[in-house]
Amino acid sequence: MTPTRDIERLVAIMARLRDPERGCPWDVQQTFATIVPYTIEEAYEVADAIERGDLDDLRDELGDLLLQVVFHARMAEEAGAFGFGDVVLAINEKLVRRHPHVFGDLEGADPQAVKRLWASIKAEEKKARRDRRAAQGLPAEPPAGALDGVPPALPALARAVKLQERAARVGFDWPDTRQVLDKIAEEIEELRAELDAGDRARLADEVGDLLFAVANLARHAGVDPETALAGTNGKFTRRFAHIEARLGEADRGPHEASLEEMEALWQEAKRLERGGS
């Protein structure tokens, strides 16, 4: 197998799929915006294969994710903006530029020096982008803020942690984890008040505040909230499947059982997970 040739074939296949006359009608009608959800989904599929330790599946999912890159690059080429080769060139140059301690004259730099260097290089890149926009007659970007650069499309919990990390860099952070617990207690009380008031808009706002505070607690505790919640989702799925299976032994379903009966089976599932009888 020749990797370069295979990549060229993939690019050619994508071009054929996007051909207005000979391509696939579904592929032809797609836009950057309509493909974005699939791109995000494929990234999650990659993460899932890694979580399960399935390397065969990981190979396939990485291929699906690569297809998303090729798809976006093809649409950009059709718009006269850039092609797949430009994407590869850009990341190659960025990797070399951001790692002078590997590819340049700074071999053997310590981790702190590398961190300072990385920040300096990124600042230079931002200046170059501003200069390029000015040369093209484009509006100047607003002054960079501490929270700039956190992608809005990130999952909400992951973005909350990123925003909190950025704020913490400039000193806006709870110094003690227990203070975050106090903040969570405060948010719960505010949520309780809105439950009594019955205003759905304000209720949604308070639920968001509570989730943000819990994400902050996870960050302080060194726990990734997305991973933690994914684990709990899996645990809930397993235990609920146990409820269904046990009820199924009597040819019944959850809709035919009382909440108390299902709770008893839930507790049974917990005991079995912990090795109990």
Image (cartoon, rainbow, N blue to C red):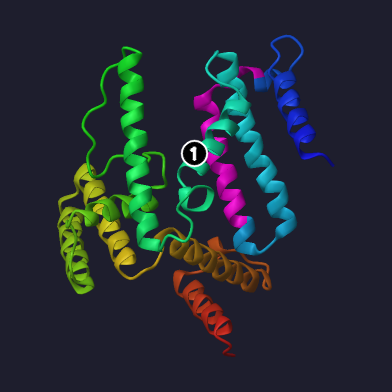
Q: Quadrant of the C terminus?
A: bottom right
- Height in image: 53 above or below 249? above
Q: Is residue 113 visible?
A: yes
Nearer the observer, 209 or 97? 97
Residue 51: image x %, image y %?
59, 62
- Height in image: 118 above or below 87? below
Residue 233: image x %, image y %?
50, 62
Nearer the observer, 139 or 19? 139
- Residue at x 48% of width, y 56% of height: 107
**Count of numbered badges drawn on the protein:** 1
Instruction: Give the magenta range.
Output: 28-48
Q: Quadrant of the N terminus?
A: top right
Query: For residue 10, what is the image quadrant?
Result: top right
- Residue at x 72% of width, y 21% of height: 17
Task: Please tell me whether residue 31 belongs to the stretch shown in magenta.
Answer: yes
What amino acid is at disc 1?
Lys
Q: Residues within 10 Å of mark 1 (few under 14, many from 20)?
A: few
Residue identifier under label 1: 94
- Residue at x 37% of width, y 53% of height: 157
Name the main secondary structure of what is drawn in magenta: helix
Query: For residue 2, what is the image quadrant?
Result: top right
